Image (cartoon, grey):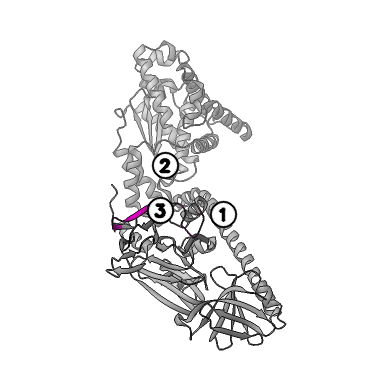
Amino acid sequence: MQIDILARPAAAAASIRLADSESITCEVGAMIAMSSGLHVETTTRNRGGGGGILKGIKRMFAGESLFLNRFTAQADGQQLVIGPRMMGDVVQHHIARGALIVQGQSWLASADGIDIDATFQGLGKALFSGESAFWVKCSGQGEVLLSSFGAIYALDIDDDYVVDTGHIVAFEDTLQFSIGKASQSLIGSFLGGEGLVCKFRGQGRLYCQSHNPPSFGNMIGRHLRAR
Amino acid sequence: MGPFDGGVFDKRLQGGRAGAQLTVDAHGVHASTTAGDTFDVPARDCQLELGGASGRMWFCRTPDRQLTIYSEARGFAEALASLPNLSQPVAELRRHRRAESRRGVLFLLAALGMLIALGIAGYFGLDYAGRAAIEALPREADERIGRLAINSMDLGGPTVHDKTVTDAVNAIVARLAEHAPGDFEYQVRVLDAETVNAFALPGGQIVVYTGLIAKAEALDEVAGVLAHEIAHVTQRHGLQRIAQSLGVAGSLELLLGDLGGLSAIAVELMRAGALTSYGRDQEREADEQGVLTMHASGLDADGIARFFQKLQKEQDEMEIPEIFAWMSSHPDLDERIANVRAQIDSLGPVAEQPLEIDWDAVRRAVGPDAEAAGSAAEADATEKAPEQNADSKAGSKAKRRKR
């Protein structure tokens, strides 16, 4: 499997070249274009992960679809182009061991060795961070494609790091994530426009996005006329 | 003990991280990566941390943080705790974690409780805030809205200029106003229409139709109705209605005293008939205050009850199915009559100071047919000409809506 990411970072798409009988599982609706030698199968489970309907329902809580599309090459050199829903970036992350916790909307695709599941990150966090209570947990071995709104940047964190709510794309499971105030005083935090922020602790990789969908929605929402 | 699934952080590794199989023995924690590299953290150097996305991942670091071996595999914590110098930190971290999750649950419960309390307070507070806002408003607000309303309303009949009638009504209102709370100035208009109705607008604008005067057998009945209407004014029910339909934002505007915007809204509401149609509670309050005012004025408060009985009789004759009675905005007339009479009983006897008005003369002056109006009030609903009967029905309808 060879992955090329095109047109980064504003409107990225991933071009995936698959060898015979290789396959990749994608978010529903992610496919932009593909070679004719690909077999498409819509399923609630992804191979290597087991699961089925129950996992599909859990996935729905995490903001993903019940169904997944699995593309399998019937011949060598088949190409599949996929893209995210929002205008933004795509990055490739290799999981060797452990897991990657992905914000619901950011999971785009994963290779066969990756199991995707929903994981609960706490109701309190969801209430106060503006992030979802459920995240997608990718574990196993293989490639994962993440999408974002705006550009993605990756950080290798050692010890503490702070990210504004709504800007998290994914983080490795060795990082602990909690909610805190941006500045010393609570009022200062809100007046500064930062409100509550996400604090990371530990060692591991963190992916952030340059823009966040709720802010963008709030900004353009009031300019949209009701039909 | 082991092996456990885990990993290693070390600068020397490609990407700084690798998956590894871990073992724990008396010397410390050992990791061997899939590539065959081995790493060791001696037990005496191991600094423990509990964290990771799940909060259940154990990290064992060297003091300089150059090397970290970690795992969240089952049994790893127990294996660490079996080392003599680590059993204490493991127990402490576990205690800390339990305390934190307990605090989290408590915090969540507190937040939920607060949300529920806020919801309840908001629900009840809105009504109170509306009233408080009204109370804070100057009297000019009422007057301005009342004037605006009466000038833009189709009152449905010509103004009556007959001194017999206007003097009598003015005398009643003057007496009542003297004993009513608040110091509103009342402007009374008598309009020539068959509608059995009277209404009050904020600020003291009172409208009485000749239909009502013709219907009342005694002065005290009209006085009772007027006392009730005056109560709507003094209790500022019109503005309360406005405040209720404005909601929170509007109530705030009221508090800040934006009368311009308020008047515009008042006119809108009035067009929708909201300004002269009051809620059940407001009607009840006006009845109560009306009785008090009548009593204080030395007039027979039972006039209110007697007039309600007239309306009741008419309503019965209109054969309105019983089922609709509860749907109308005002409390059931039977209930209102009972309430008024109970209140009168509780107030005790009154030194009556009747007004010196020739009521029969007033009724003759308003009635199209003086004799009929003067003599047979109890039979009038049945003996009226068909078109008059129809009119009286229409009047009752208006009355039901407005009073």
Q: Is A210 in front, or is B184?
A: A210
Crowding at dot 3, Cα within 10 Å, few <14 / some 14-19 / many 20+, comes out as few
Q: CA distance from mark 3 to mark 2?
A: 18 Å
- Pinpoint residue A221: horizontal percent, then vertical percent: 32, 57
Image quadrant occupied by the N terminus of chain B = bottom right
Which chain does the numbered disc 1 sit on? B
Q: Is B72 in front, or is A17?
A: A17
Read off the magenta span.
Answer: A32-51
Vertically, is B380 above or below A40?
Answer: above
Crowding at dot 2, Cα within 10 Å, few <14 / some 14-19 / many 20+, comes out as many
Choose top left, top right, bottom left or bottom right for residue B252.
bottom left
Which chain does the numbered disc 2 sit on? B
Q: Which residue is mark 2?
A: B238
**SS for callout 2:** helix
Callouts 1 and 2 in the same chain: yes
Q: CA distance from mark 1 to mark 2?
A: 30 Å
Q: Which residue is mark 3?
A: B249
Vertically, is B355 above or below B128?
Answer: above
Mark 3 or 2: in front is 3
Tags 3 and 1 touching, CB below 8 Å: no
Image quadrant occupied by the C terminus of chain B = top left
